[in-house]
Image (cartoon, rainbow, N blue to C red):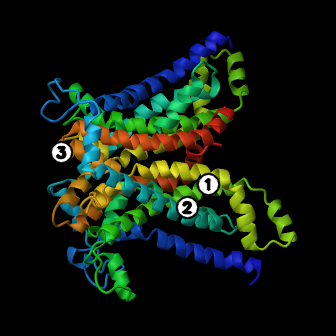
Amino acid sequence: MARSMERAAGYLFVLPALLYMLFFVGYPIVDNFRLSLFDVNVMNIARGDQPFVGLGNYKELFDQGVILTTLTNTLIYTVACIVFQFIVGLGFALLFSRPFRMAERLRGLVMISWLLPATITAMTFKFMFGTSGGIVNELLAMLHLSGGPVEWLVTPFTAMFALVLANTWIGIPFNMMLLTTGLTTIPKDIYESAAIDGANAVQRFFRLTLPLLKPAILSLLVLGFIYTFKVFDLVLIMTHGGPVNATQMMSTYAYKLSFDEFNFSQGAAASNLMFLVLLVIGFIYLRLVYREEVKGA
Amino acid sequence: MSQRQLSTWLLPVVSIVLVALFLFPVYWLVVTSFKAEGEIFRSPPTWFPQTIYLKAYTEQLSGSSYNIFEGFRNSAIIAFGALAISTVLAVPASYGLARFKFPGMHLFLLLFLVTQMLPASLILTPLFIQFKHLGLIGSSYWGTILANATAGIPFSVVTLRTYFATLPKELEESAKIDGCGLFGTFVRIMIPIAVPGVVVAMVFSFLFAWGDLIFGMTFIGKEHMRPITAGIYNFLGFQSTSWNNTMAFGTVSIIPVVLIFIFIQRYIVSGLTNGAVKG
């Protein structure tokens, strides 16, 4: 195929999707930045005479201080989720990588929690963590583990805990699948020779399995961070950011500013700050993975 | 105990118990939707409904405040709309990125990879304003459909690009000898071969939009046009939540997910790993 032909064809195939994304994602990102520098609210949104305020919206966000609370909350939530998801995900991955009948099928079944709409999961966990009649409290009472009903979603620490638990449940299959893929790339004979050399199961796990899984673990942690940091539906439904911002996340706060208080430019500023955090993490991810992606082309 | 015994009965039994415990929330969701209001809050709880109570479902047919089937229809319109846009745009794009060399292709791929990671809340406010000017806010599905396709497109491009790249180049070469043009080769030869990959991309585009809450609840003002997720969100906002109704909503809305899972589980697993980690 002639060079110029190939170029033209390439653009022809790629451009429609690219233009779509530029129009519905690229432009909004730029516009979001513009919005954050003006004072746009429900009164002047239609008129178009919004005053320029420079970094005023950002300053106001930091003066109010909630933005820092949401940043801390989101980081705590994200790190806690990643740790739990990884541990359980790795456990499942190792378990189902053992050769037994039904391993494939059971591993598949675990995927369901990842596929369900987050709204449904959030609602189910909200119900299970209910103060009176919630199954979690009922179980604790049956096992004589609690002195009375725990008010899970209306106490700061337990509300965060419940959110982390719900999201861990969602994220386990993702971790399990990526680690399973990582495990299949480890050649089996390495273990055999290690066993001959007298390494026991624990040594084999820490000296062989974990180091060899490192590439999978790295991209898993970064991707997990990005996907977890974005949390919205789960929090909105389970706690609505409460009690008193104790579980308010960057995304829910930005939403609240824009669509509950109709302060569009502060909402834009808040989501830009969130974007900044993700950008830093995304950059790390691309350094880790993108090179491979291009090489594979 | 010998290694063989371990894998013939202990591992399967332990695994089944663990997976059953893991999936308990799904069971609890479905079971609760069939309980009467009084039984839901009984202590100790009943693990299975004493009487199967269908009122949470039948009530919807008599046209109460929020209609479950209306919500289902709205979610379906939104999800199929986003799926259609995403497929039409992403299939050629992924093929272009996999097969042709042109300036900027690495940058384009990078852009798709990055957009896959962006939070919806980042583009929400500008899109809201943009759609408002275009008249797509309020009583229209379009704003929600267009916004949801932005999740399906990058995922599909990244997943399918890998898929097309694994197909042998000889396919196109022999098609060319047989007199097939570039476009003809793509439509008549490549797409049919790539069907398994395309199906995975379509399924995920559908699922992303099916689970959407943020766009649907922000862009659609009319109660009777909102997706099932937004309906649930509204329902939970009331002081006294009617849990069996809410759980019935939930059960209905996971039906497509479970069906998809049953039929193409194998492909989903490969799709997830292809789209998420490449390397």
Judging by the rendered image, the residue that carries numbered circle 1 is A217
Secondary structure beneath dot 2 equals: helix
Res. A86 mark:
2
Dot 1 crowding, Cα within 10 Å, few <14, some 14–19, many 20+: some
Q: Is residue B94 left or right of residue A272?
A: right
Amino acid type, label 3: Glu
Secondary structure beneath dot 1 equals: helix
Q: Earlier in the sequence, mark 2 or mark 3?
A: 2
Chain label for disc 1: A
Dot 2 crowding, Cα within 10 Å, few <14, some 14–19, many 20+: many
Chain label for disc 2: A
Judging by the rendered image, the residue that carries numbered circle 3 is A261
Real-space CA distance between mark 3 and mark 1, rounded to the nearest whole angstrom: 41 Å
Q: Indicate the position of residue A188 as horizontal and vertical percent values.
A: 79, 60
Q: Is residue B251 visible?
A: no
Q: Is residue B83 above or below residue B134?
A: below
Q: Nearer the viewer, residue A156 or A10?
A: A156
Q: Is residue A203 above or below residue A145?
A: above
Q: Residue at x 20, y 66 (%)?
A: B242
Q: Nearer the viewer, residue A278 or B171?
A: A278
> CB atoms at circles 1 and 2 under 8 Å apart?
yes
